[in-house]
């Protein structure tokens, strides 16, 4: 019985001594919520109106909103497709990308991977990386871009434009090729790597 009392006394002594002492400062807790999206939506097709008239349609497989990240952003990591309609609901422009991020506070879009845009004039823009700064009303890229116009195809590295892609300039033109409509090869037979 005396051994039991001695062991009990020693355990209590160790427990009380470990509980005593000053308060220790702890770091801020990292919660799972910091890395989880506030919204996770799948199979999205939505219409966006302007002044009560439907102007845009957005299709995406997955739309994630990360509001606690710094900076906060929307993620479209499985691709995005956007169409702009005219007053008769005919598609007049479109944007497609494999991945897109929208930094909501900065009002900046980052489109990546097989970015394809068709503007109101029917010109087609293809690149791997494109930014759209809504505050500055500017679209730009520092990567290779291919612009297909009705009578020519332009290759360049880097460009900037207004939001409608009507007025643009190139930083480094690699080539301008005029299109002969009678002897034009199908677009899938052209190789970008063959142009130096």
Image (cartoon, rainbow, N blue to C red):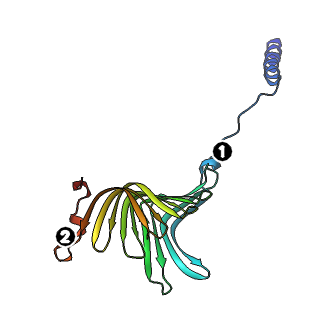
Callout 1 touching callout 2 (CB < 8 Å): no
User: Which label lies toward us, 1 or 2?
Assistant: 2
Q: Residue drawn at (48%, 80%), measured in percent from left and top?
A: 85
Q: Residue furthest bottom?
A: 88
Q: Quadrant of residue 171?
A: bottom left
Residue 24 location, x and y as percent? Answer: 77, 28
Q: Give the secondary structure at mark 2.
A: loop
Residue 172 location, x and y as percent? Answer: 35, 54
Q: Quadrant of the N terminus?
A: top right
Q: Residue drawn at (66%, 41%), measured in percent from left and top?
A: 30
Q: Residue drawn at (44%, 68%), measured in percent from left and top?
A: 167
Q: Is residue 40 visible?
A: yes
Q: Give the secondary structure at mark 1.
A: loop
Task: From the image, tell me which residue sits under label 2.
Answer: 185
In the picture, the disc for residue 31 is 1
Give the alpha-carbon distance from disc 1 to disc 2, as whole Å: 57 Å
Whichever of labels 1 and 2 marks the residue nearer the N terminus, that label is 1
């Amino acid at each position: 019985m005396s051994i039991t009392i001695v062991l009990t006394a020693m355990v209590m002594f160790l427990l009380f001594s470990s509980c005593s002492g000053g308060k220790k400062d702890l770091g801020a807790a990292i919660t799972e919520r910091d890395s989880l999206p506030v919204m996770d939506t799948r199979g999205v097709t939505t219409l966006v109106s302007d002044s009560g008239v439907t102007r845009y349609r957005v299709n995406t497989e997955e739309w994630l909103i990360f509001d606690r990240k710094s900076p906060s952003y929307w993620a479209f990591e499985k691709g995005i497709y956007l169409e702009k309609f005219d007053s008769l609901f005919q598609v007049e422009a479109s944007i497609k990308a494999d991945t897109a991020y929208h930094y909501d506070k900065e009002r900046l879009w980052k489109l990546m991977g097989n970015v394809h845009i068709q503007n109101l004039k029917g010109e087609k823009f293809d690149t791997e990386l494109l930014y759209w700064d809504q505050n500055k009303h500017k679209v730009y890229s520092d990567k290779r871009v291919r612009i297909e116009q009705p009578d020519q195809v332009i290759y360049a590295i880097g460009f900037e434009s207004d939001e409608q892609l009507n007025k643009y300039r190139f930083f480094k033109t690699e080539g301008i090729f005029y299109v002969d409509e009678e002897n034009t090869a199908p677009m899938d037979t052209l190789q970008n790597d063959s142009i130096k």
